[in-house]
Every structure is written in structure tokens, then in C-alpha cells.
């Protein structure tokens, strides 16, 4: 028995979807802020510092700058991972609610089919006996 898209959409518990939507939106916004944020270094400040340093000190400063940049990137990735995990959890919770609702609707549909079958058999029997 085929269910049309419109009928399937009617089965979705839209109240639950709408009530959880702000959580999903907040998670997506946090994720976008983390992903969209890019840090840039001030080249004017770096040029001033390089004039005052010896070549060895410049190399050490470059390594320290690179290490601090990598540490910042790792921290950003960790925040992004946490935001992604929160978003995935919210989506998984919504998905489980939808699956439960679809299962309930399937059971109700089977009950209605059984009742209609019983009514059809009763009608055929009553028509045959007459």
C-alpha cells in the first residue's frame, strides 16, 4: 500500500519538530561561527618585531608564532567538534522522535486496516446470507 508524500508529511509530529527547531538552529549557528571565524596575523606588528631581532631570534619567534597559531587552530577545531557533536545529538534526538511517531502511525494504520477488513467481511457475509 503506497503512501503519498502528502500523507507521509501529515504523519510527522510537527509540534515536536517545531519545538526542537530552535535547538538545532542554535547548534547550527554556533557551528557556523566556529567554522566561519578565521584568525589573521597583523603583518605590520610582525615587520616591526623582525627588524629588532637576530636571525636566530627571528627563527625562534617564527616557530613560537607558528606553534601559537597551531594551538589556536586546535582549540578552534575542538570547539567545532563539540558544536558538531551537540548538533548531531539534537538531530539524532529529533530523528528518534520521528521514528517513534512513524512506528505509532504504522501500528494505527494496521489496526484500521484490520477493522476495515472485519467490516468488509461482515458486509459480504450479510449480503450473502440475505
Image: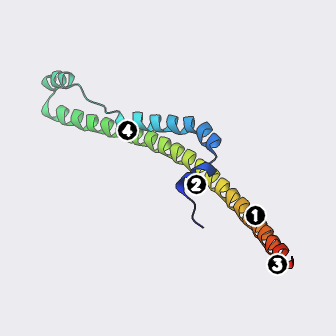
Q: Residues within 10 Å of mark 4 (few under 14, many from 20)?
A: few
Q: Nearer the viewer, residue 110 or 85?
A: 110
Position of the N terminus by quadrant? bottom right
As drawn, is 76 to the left or to the right of 62?
A: right
Task: Give percent across and percent down for residue 13.
Answer: 64, 46
Q: Which mark is residue 128?
A: 3
Q: Are marks 3 and 4 in contact (CB under 8 Å)?
A: no
**Circle 1 sits on which residue?**
111
> Where 124 sits versus 34, above or below?
below
N-terminal of the pair, mark 2 or mark 3, is 2
**Circle 4 sits on which residue?**
35
Q: Residues within 10 Å of mark 1 (few under 14, many from 20)?
A: few
**Circle 2 sits on which residue?**
8
Q: CA distance from mark 4 to mark 1?
A: 49 Å
Q: CA distance from mark 3 to mark 4?
A: 72 Å
N-terminal of the pair, mark 4 or mark 2, is 2
Q: Residues within 10 Å of mark 2 (few under 14, many from 20)?
A: few
Q: Nearer the viewer, residue 64 or 2?
A: 2
- Secondary structure under tag 1 reads helix
Amino acid at each position: 500500500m503506497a503512501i503519498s508524500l502528502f500523507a507521509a508529511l501529515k504523519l510527522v509530529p510537527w509540534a515536536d519538530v517545531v519545538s526542537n527547531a530552535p535547538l538545532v538552529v542554535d547548534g547550527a549557528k554556533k557551528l557556523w561561527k566556529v567554522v566561519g571565524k578565521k584568525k589573521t596575523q597583523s603583518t605590520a606588528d610582525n615587520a616591526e618585531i623582525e627588524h629588532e631581532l637576530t636571525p636566530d631570534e627571528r627563527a625562534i619567534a617564527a616557530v613560537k608564532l607558528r606553534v601559537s597559531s597551531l594551538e589556536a587552530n586546535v582549540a578552534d577545531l575542538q570547539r567545532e567538534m563539540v558544536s558538531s557533536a551537540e548538533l548531531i545529538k539534537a538531530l539524532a534526538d529529533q530523528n528518534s522522535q520521528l521514528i517513534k511517531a512513524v512506528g505509532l502511525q504504522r501500528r494505527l494504520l494496521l489496526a484500521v486496516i484490520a477493522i476495515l477488513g472485519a467490516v468488509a467481511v461482515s458486509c459480504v457475509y450479510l449480503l450473502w446470507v440475505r
